Image (tube, rainbow, N blue to C red):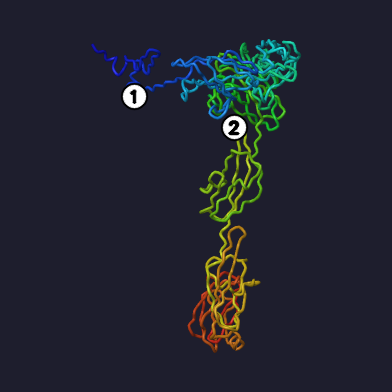
Amino acid sequence: MSNPLWDFGADAEIGIRGTTQNINVSVNSPTYLQNNSCVHFYYTNCPKPTNFTIAYVSPDEVSFQWSAGLSGETNWTIIYGPDGFDPSTGGTSITTTATNAVIPGLMQLTQYDIYIFADCDTNLQSLSLTGTFLTPPYCANPLGMTNTNAVDSIFTTWTWTASSANYPSTSFNLQYGSGGFDLYSEGTIIPVDNNLTDSIISPSFLAGGVYDVYVQAVCGSDTSQFIGPFSIVMPLTNDSICGAELLPVNGVSYMFNNTGATVDVGDVAIAPPATGAQATDGWQNSNVNNTTWFKFVAPPSGDIRIDGTATNYNGQIAVYDPASCLSIVPTDLVGANDNAIQGTSVAPNFTVCGLTPGLEYYLMHDGFISVAGNYSIAISEIILNAGTTTSLLNVCYGDTVNLFTGITGQDAGGVWTQEIPTLGLQDSLFVTNGLASVIFNFTYTVSDGCAADDENASVKIWSPSSAGVDGSITVCKNEPFNLLSGLNGNVDLGGTWYNPQNQVLSSSLDTAGAFPGQFNYDYIVSNGICPADTANVLIVVDPTCDYLVGIEELNSSVLVYPNPASNVLFIQMNNYSLEAIEIFDNSGRQVLKKLVGGTNSTEIDVTSLVLGLYKIRIKATEGVYHTSFIKQ
């Protein structure tokens, strides 16, 4: 009778059976049967060897063995060389008919790779069986260490056996440091005599501190490897506040163990309030377990970071500013943290700011749970530098400026903000499109928790230079003219005029020659920030009139009144017909123009003009007359 529990291979083996080997691919696996439709088996007539094992390794020799493959092969090729070598192009090759080999002439403290190939027939070789080993030093490694302690002291013993009579020990080195220290870049090394026991005495040992100790043999000019670490916990003399251990504010992470720590009544009374995990003024709850005490001196900045995340122990820290260790009260609390503010560690990591430089503060470490263990504390000074302002940043409208070009010496990772927010601020870039041509102020702020430093930068947007719109002026022969009256649109003053011979003019004033024709003048203006702009004024010299002919008679026939004028200005010529009236301000810009059309009198509305002196250019049938009037 069928059993539904056996469906889809739930009671089935998939594989092959043979006289020397059985291979199972799947045993009672519905998942395999549902996800695979076929199995391929590939036969090799030269299988690789198996079971690589090391018999012994000395500084200059290794002995190893292996087993023949399924074909029972009897010839092998061995290729060996330094770690990472390519056996197809390098290494040293040997052949053998035994299932073991000895390789002499090796280098001490060197990692070697071994490849073993079965030679089944001519041009028929198996895949490789691989192995690796490290040769020991000639100066033998110590074999072990035992450590005991007392306040400020570690008492050490170890064992050692020479590798040969040629390499006796002459002394030993001890290296120690806070738990987890980097053997190659941290810690302290002290040479000791040739006995197998010694003492490390140092006032720098911290109460409850976890220390790692290594030992190294010295054989004349040769040395062994450092063997360790062997951990030791210093006596717990800081179980109460008045036994607080002094911690350096140096950013170094020190490891401690709170096994055996107790909770004093005073510890319970001053426990931080329950303001929540990842707060800086309290804990998740006010329970205390396994309390230990430390103290530190506030650095010059008055700002510190306390970080316990080097060891992910579920602990919490509080910082106090008491008058003395005998009179601590809850109001002495200046900062506390349960879980790390940054990251996901259950160990504390937070900042405390505004401490008084040089003043001594107390630190309580507590276990969030009653389980004792290793924990770490690192106290570092927070020193932030937002840089120094260099100069005002001048930029042309439409351009983009990097605000970092306005400060120097700043720390990375800060944030730019704007005094008056605009869409132009994009991280450290300020895009000026669509913004007014004024000065914009910015602040660069670097922060670490509660500590911050900032610096200001300013950007002045300049409007593009404008030489105005090209224009033309028609004048009589020998007639003076002001080139500004030939420009239209917005014109920046202070530019440079060039005459038709490309010579610089001292002003916008010039005089037509005695010959009629068309003459080009260029005006180039730049504000020093934006690209220069150029405009052209075409001077057309009329051949039908001459400014110098009959000018005295013309001047005597002109009457301009009232002068000063408020609203209407009357202009009359006794003997000539008027053609056009032009009025210019003091800068030479044309402000009014009227075509008269052959009469000998006209009036002009000057109501819109601002108060001041204006020049009048009167063109008549016989010439051009210049005068002025005052708008009042």
In terms of image quadrants, where is residue 574? bottom right
Q: Name the residue beneath numbered marker 1.
A: 36
Image position, residue 174 (x, y; %): 71, 17
**How far across and how far down the image is residue 255, in percent?**
63, 19
Of the numbered discs 1 and 2, the one sitting upstream in the chain is 1
Can residue 211 be seen at all in this image of the molecule? no
From mark 1 to mark 2, how far is it between C-alphas? 56 Å
Q: Amino acid at mark 1?
A: Asn
Residue sitting at the far front: 122
**Relative to the observer, which residue lies in front, 552 or 613?**
552
Q: Disc 1 or disc 2, which is closer to the eye?
A: 1
Q: Amino acid at mark 2?
A: Gly
Query: Who is closer to the viewer here, 511 or 262?
Result: 511
The quadrant holding residue 381 is top right
The residue shown at (66%, 11%) is: 145
Q: Which mark, by number, is residue 449?
A: 2
